[in-house]
Amino acid sequence: MEMPPPPWIVGHRGAGGEAPENTVESFHLAVKQGADMVELDLQLTADGSLVAFHDRDLHLLNQEAVPLEGLSLDQLADAVFLDRRGKKRRGDSIPTLAKTLATLPVDLPLNLELKRYGADREALVSALDREIAGREQLLLSSFDWDLLALVRQRLPGRPVAPIAKEAADALLDAARELEAYSVHCDWRMARHNLVHQARAAGRPTLVYTVNQPDLARRLLARGVSGLFSDHPGRIRRQLEMAET
Ligand code: G3P
Ligand code: MG
């Protein structure tokens, strides 16, 4: 990864607080707002495509909840569902990774968060291998550390990052075993000890989800390198205002 000097503002699900999350519109908005990196959640469809979506289930209009991983890309495109904000969305607004990569600048650092609810790990890594071929500046992260171990095996040289919301020691151990580029965690976990130990091992700590400037300042003072924010432009302005 080639990154500017920290601190880094990472657009969470694009600019997920200001546009429908994990959409091309949201990714472009994060870029326009000057995010240093854009994070998106990826899942595998039943026929082997990677698409940007956070939740396990699609909530269809008849209130049926359908796991996305059980749908083919065509079935997904035909679905109409209610998003997290209760707004009606068409499945074809869920971008594939291929479309996402095609529409974003090649030198933009992207954090592809690999969500796996029940999908086959081998199939997921095969799809990833195919779809990111030739593209650099991609940081591959996941809560599923076994999946990341497979990524390291099958795609050597690709930077990875384990994510956790608890258990700092286990996260640091996983980062060491995976030879991770960075350590990602819920901001509540990012105590001085974790950040310090990660840094001593040469790894920046990135924390989610930070939308309040006071909290952002406290975390940066603790040595955190990156903040996932739903409002990347706003949080950067607020941090810069505090500096002047
Ligand atoms: O990748 C950081 C963060 O996005 C992890 O949590 O639930 O927002 O995907 P979540
Ligand atoms: Mg995520």
Image: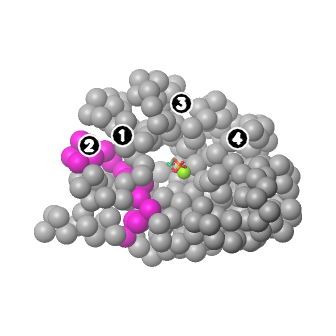
- Amino acid, disc 1: Arg
Other-residue count near label 2 (Cα within 10 Å), few / some / many at <14 / 14–19 / ≥20: many
**Beta carbon at label 3 within 8 Å of ligand 1:** no
The three-letter code of the residue at mark 3 reads Leu
Task: Identify the residue shown where x is 48% and y is 71%.
Answer: 18
Q: Give the CA distance from mark 4 to mark 3.
A: 21 Å
Secondary structure of the residue carrying tag 3 is helix
- In this view, the mark in front (1 or 3): 1
The residues bearing labels 2 and 4 have C-alpha atoms spaced at a distance of 32 Å
Q: Amino acid at mark 4?
A: Tyr
Q: Earlier in the sequence, mark 2 or mark 3?
A: 3
Residue at which label 3 appears: 178
When the figure is inspected, residue 204 is found, relative to residue 20, above or below; the finding is above
Residue highlighted by disc 2: 223
- Res. 84 mark: none
Question: Could you give the CA–CA distance between mark 2 and mark 1, rounded to whole angstroms?
Answer: 14 Å
Horizontally, residue 88 falls left or right of residue 123, namely left
243 on left or right of 75: left
Question: Residue at point 37% right, 36% down?
Answer: 189
User: Foreground mark, 2 or 1?
Assistant: 1
Q: Which residue is mark 4?
A: 117
Disc 2 or 1, which lies upstream in sequence?
A: 1
Residue type of the residue flagged with mark 2: Gly
Are dots 4 and 3 in contact, CB under 8 Å?
A: no
